[in-house]
Amino acid sequence: MFFSLSTCIPCILASLHLTFPSAQNRLYFPPHPTFVSFAPFAPFAPFVSFAPFAPFVNFVPEETIVPLTYTVFDLDETLYSTSAGLMQDVARRITRWLEHHLGMDPEEASRLREVYTHRYGTTLGGLLAERAREVDVEDYLAFVHDVPVEAYLRPDPALRAMLTAIPLRRVVFTNSTVEHAARVLNALGIADLFERVVDIRALNFIHKPRLEAYERLLALLDAPGPACILIDDRAVNLQPAKQLGMTTVLVDGEPQDGADFVVSSVLEVGPLIQRLLAQEG
Ligand SMILES: [Mg+2]
């Protein structure tokens, strides 16, 4: 044999620009200077271990299987149902803020909220992108989250049991504030189960679904993407996570690009993670 199969396969995959890791095969290829420097020769990968050149060329990246370490939960409408009504109240507060601060009528403000949410992922993202000078961010965040959280949410023993059974570190990753997250988690009776809330301030006001928000999350956790499972109720928020190698779970949505798994209720996340860990061995 002129070349070994084990040497060729990673090189062939690299030449085809396949992306690793996937959720089912979480091989992590860390940056490898030798590998990168020979990238132009990737189409010839099958021949690189041809015996005479073996001492000079090493195309084989160091493969690392990254163990799952973190479950990263979105907060609103992921850890509780949309039907709770809390976010509809927040949406009304956002519309009112736009009315008061930008001098819009209710219909105009509501339309702008929808446009910004569609275009940027959040209303605040749109405001910062297009009207930053007109926005006092802290005033906005305080106003829109000034809702009676405890009137909408109750302690959820089933949710608590599910989370407790997950043998991974648990964090919240939210476009809202740590104050709002604390109220929600306390109202649900699960605040003590999360070691950290990564909120919009921790993200330097760079929100999901911008890729930089996920890179910041990983930096704060000091973890590579494949070590994380992200659970979110919006498919658009899963795509950047997938790009960074995270395993992604969509709660209460239709199967879409970026979602490795879809569950109809957050309570299904626990059993799903148990299955993934069992496969991991
Ligand atoms: Mg959400």
Image (cartoon, rainbow, N blue to C red):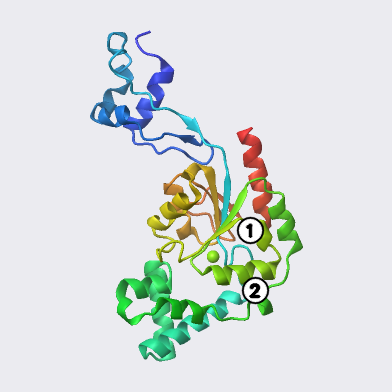
> Which labelled disc corresponds to residue 125?
none
Name which of mark 2 and mark 1 comes first in the sequence.
2
Say if residue 81 shows up in the picture: no
Q: Where in the figure is residue 252, as x and y percent of width and height?
A: 59, 61
**Left or right of 3 on screen, residue 256:** right
Say if residue 189 shows up in the picture: yes
Mark 1, residue position: 264
- The front one of 111 and 226 is 226
Picture quarter containing residue 82?
Answer: bottom right
Q: What residue do we see at 68% from left, 60% from top?
A: 192
* Amino acid bearing label 2: Ala
Picture quarter containing residue 251?
Answer: bottom right
Q: Can you tell which of label 2 and label 1 is closer to the viewer? A: 2
Packing grade of label 1 (10 A; few <14, some 14-19, many >=20) is few
Q: What residue do we see at 40% from left, 69% from top?
A: 118
Q: What residue do we see at 63% from left, 39% from top?
A: 277
The answer to whether 35 is drawn above or below residue 183 in the figure is above
Q: Where in the figure is residue 153, as x and y percent of width and height?
A: 68, 73
> Gap in Å between the C-alphas at discs 2 and 1?
16 Å
The answer to whether 13 is drawn above or below residue 272 in the figure is above
Q: Where in the figure is residue 245, as x and y percent of width and height?
A: 46, 44
* Amino acid bearing label 1: Ser
The answer to whether 126 is drawn above or below residue 226 in the figure is below
The image quadrant where one finds ligand 1 is bottom right
> Which labelled disc corresponds to residue 84?
2
Q: What residue do we see at 47% from left, 76% from top?
A: 141
**Left or right of 236 on screen, residue 281:** right
The answer to whether 53 is drawn above or below residue 11 in the figure is above
SS label for mark 2: helix
Count the labels in the image: 2
